[in-house]
Amino acid sequence: MKYLLLSFTLYVFIFPALAEQYSTPEITLREYLSCFETSDEQCVLNNYHGINSFYTGKPHKTDYKITKEVVFGSKEAKLWNDAGIVPKAFKGDVSLDVLQTSNDRKSMYSYTFRKYGKKWLIYSHSAWGLGLE
């Protein structure tokens, strides 16, 4: 009976939460930014494809607002690739422009996501508009 109850608890509460993780670019972004509250490098790496280290700095909270979302079609992927940006973009990738506030400082970032299996992961990001008022 004890094992049945444990199995039921895992099935109802734990597995759905794990399935939600990385299920959309927005959820991955939320998870990624939360990693900086504890300066958890492994947490960052879990949300990012293609890197094996990341400096997180001192723990800090980041508030954010997604200001623009673009789902790449053939045209957007071609523009990205023709500009020589690495890694290459593909149709279906998603770009989020994000206004972030950390330590009372506002900055703009762009994050680009791709679905790897069932997970949406960041594969590129850039900062622009640092220190906005």
Image (cartoon, rainbow, N blue to C red):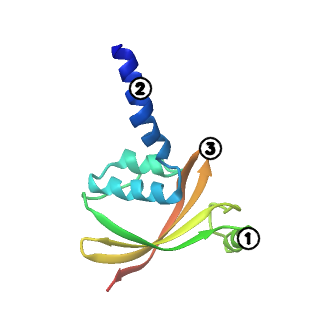
- The residue lying at 44 percent from left, 30 percent from top is 11
Q: Amino acid at mark 3?
A: Gly
Residue 97 located left or right of residue 6: right
Dot 2: element = helix
- Numbered mark located on residue 8 in the image: 2
Which residue is denoted by mark 3 in the rendering?
117
Q: Is residue 44 above or below residue 16?
A: below
Q: Is residue 77 visible?
A: yes
Quarter residue 82 falls in: bottom right
Which residue is denoted by mark 1 in the rendering?
78
- The residue lying at 69 percent from left, 72 percent from top is 76
Count of numbered circles in the view: 3
Which of the two discs, 2 and 3, labels the residue nearer the N terminus?
Answer: 2
Q: Amino acid at mark 1?
A: Lys
Q: Nearer the viewer, mark 2 or mark 3?
A: 2
Q: Is residue 71 above or below residue 55?
A: below
Residue 124 located left or right of residue 60: right
Per the model, the C-alpha gap separating discs 2 and 1 is 48 Å
Provide residue 69's location: percent of width, then percent of height: 55, 71
Dot 3: element = loop
> Which residue is outermost to the bottom?
133
Dot 1: element = helix
- The residue lying at 70 percent from left, 74 percent from top is 79
Which of the two discs, 2 and 1, labels the residue nearer the N terminus?
Answer: 2
